[in-house]
Image (cartoon, helix red, strand yellow):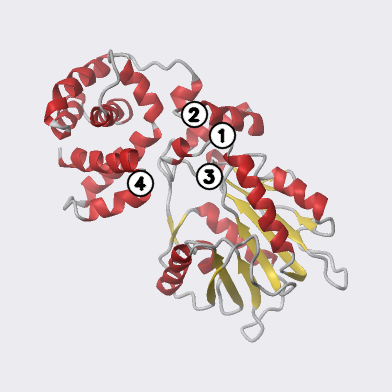
Amino acid sequence: MASRRVALEVLARVEDEGAYANLALSPVLERSGLGERDRALVTDLVYGTLRRRRALDHLVDRFLADPPPAAARRALRLGAYQLVERPEIPSYAAVSATVGAAPKRLRGLVNAVLRRVAEAPVEYPDEATALSYPDWVLARLTEDLGRERALGALAAMNEPARTHVRADGYVQDPASGMVAAAVLDALPPGRTAARPARVADLCAAPGGKATALAAPDVWVVAGDVAPVRAGLVVGNAARTGAAGVAVVVADASAPPLRAGWFDGVLVDAPCSGLGVLRRRPDARWRVDPDAPGRLAAVQRRMVDAAVGLLAPGGVLTYSVCTLTAAETLGIDDHLAGHHRDLEPLAPPEGWERWGRGGLLLPQAAGADGMALFQYRRPSREGRPGRRDS
C-alpha cells in the first residue's frame, strides 16, 4: 500500500501541478523510506501509468457514468495499469492496495470500478488508444516514417527505457553516446594535448555529450541559454572529472564565440522529443501538434549560427531526439539550400540512412530515437572530408 501512496503522490504532482515526472519522482522516493525493490515498483507504476494514460482511461471509462474527481481518476489509472500491464501482480492485490492508498471518500468508487476492469476483456477502439498516444502523434509519425516503422517506434517507446552508465559514472542513453562518438570521429587528425581540437557544444545542458567529448586532446566550450541549466553542465563536468569543459551562458542562435575557430560544432537542438517518449513518459501529453514546425524555425537559426563558427575543415553535427521530418530532413533541406559549400558526411556505422544523414529508430537500436546529420566545411586546400557522401 505504501508504494501505491507514493506513486499517487508523484502522479498528483505531475497532473495537478505540472511537474515533470523525472524531476518529481526522485525527491519523493528519497524521503519515502522505501527499500530498493519498492522504489523500483513505484518508478514503474508512475512511468507506466503516465505512458498508458489514454489506454487506461478507455478501460476505466466503460464503467463510469460521470467523470470522476481527479484523485479518483489517478487511483483508477494506477489500478488499471497493474491489472492490465503487470500480470504478475494478483488482481486482488492490485485492487486492494490501490483502494487502500486512495482517499477514504473515494475508496468505494475505486473499488467498484477496478473490480469490473479486472473482470472485463481488454479491448481498444483504435490504434492510437491501444498504443496510448495522442491521435496527432500517430498520424505525424505515420506520415513521416511510414506505417510499419511508426507503429514499431511507438510500441518500443511504451517499454521501459534502458540506461547505460559510462566509465566516468554518468548515466546516458546509448543514442546520446553515439552522437558524441560521431562528433569525435569527425574531428581532424593530428590533435594533441598541446594543440587540442576545439569543439563548441551549443545546447549542452545537462552536459552528457559535452563531458563525453572532453579529453586531453579535445577542449569543449559548452553553452546553454539558461543559467540554471548551464550550472548543470558545470556540476556534471566536476562529477565526471571532465576538466576540458568551459561553460558559458549563451544563446545557440547567436553564440558569443569566435567565428571560424572551431574544429567541431555540435547542435543537439531543442526539439519535440518524439524519439524519447519512453524516457519522458509525460511528454507525449505535453507536446502539441504545432511543436515540430515551431521548433524547426528555432533549429534553423541555430544551425545557421553554428556554420559561422566552423574552421576550415571543421564539422557541424546536428542531432535531435525526435523522429519528425520537419525537424530532421527539413533542417537538412535548409542547410542544402542556404549553405551549399558544406559537404555532407555519410552517417556512421549503426545509423539507418535518413536523407543525407542518419536515423536511430527505438525499435531497432534499443535506445532513444535520434537523428544525426554531419557536414564538413571545405578546408583551404580543398581536402575531401571523412565519410563523404
* Figure check: 207 above or below 216: above
- The residue pinned by badge 2 equals 134
Question: How many residues crowd around disc 2 within 10 Å: few (fewer than 14), some, or many (20 or more)?
Answer: some
Residue 31 % position (x, y)? 19, 55
**For the residues bearing labels 1 and 2, Cβ distance under 8 angstroms:** yes
* Figure check: 363 above or below 382: above
Identify which residue, 196 or 364, lies in the foreground.
196
* Figure check: 387 above or below 54: below
Which element carries disc 3, helix, strand or loop? loop
Nearer the observer, disc 1 or disc 2?
Answer: 1
* Figure check: 306 above or below 275: below
Hey, what amino acid is under mark 2?
Pro
Dot placed on the residue nearer the N-terminal end, 1 or 2: 2
Mark pair 4, 3: CA separation: 17 Å
Dot placed on the residue nearer the N-terminal end, 3 or 2: 2
- The residue pinned by badge 4 equals 19
- The residue pinned by badge 1 equals 289
- The image quarter containing residue 228 is bottom left
Mark pair 3, 2: CA separation: 14 Å
Q: Which mark is residue 273?
A: 3
Q: Is residue 117 left or right of residue 190?
A: left
Which element carries disc 1, helix, strand or loop? loop
Dot placed on the residue nearer the N-terminal end, 4 or 1: 4
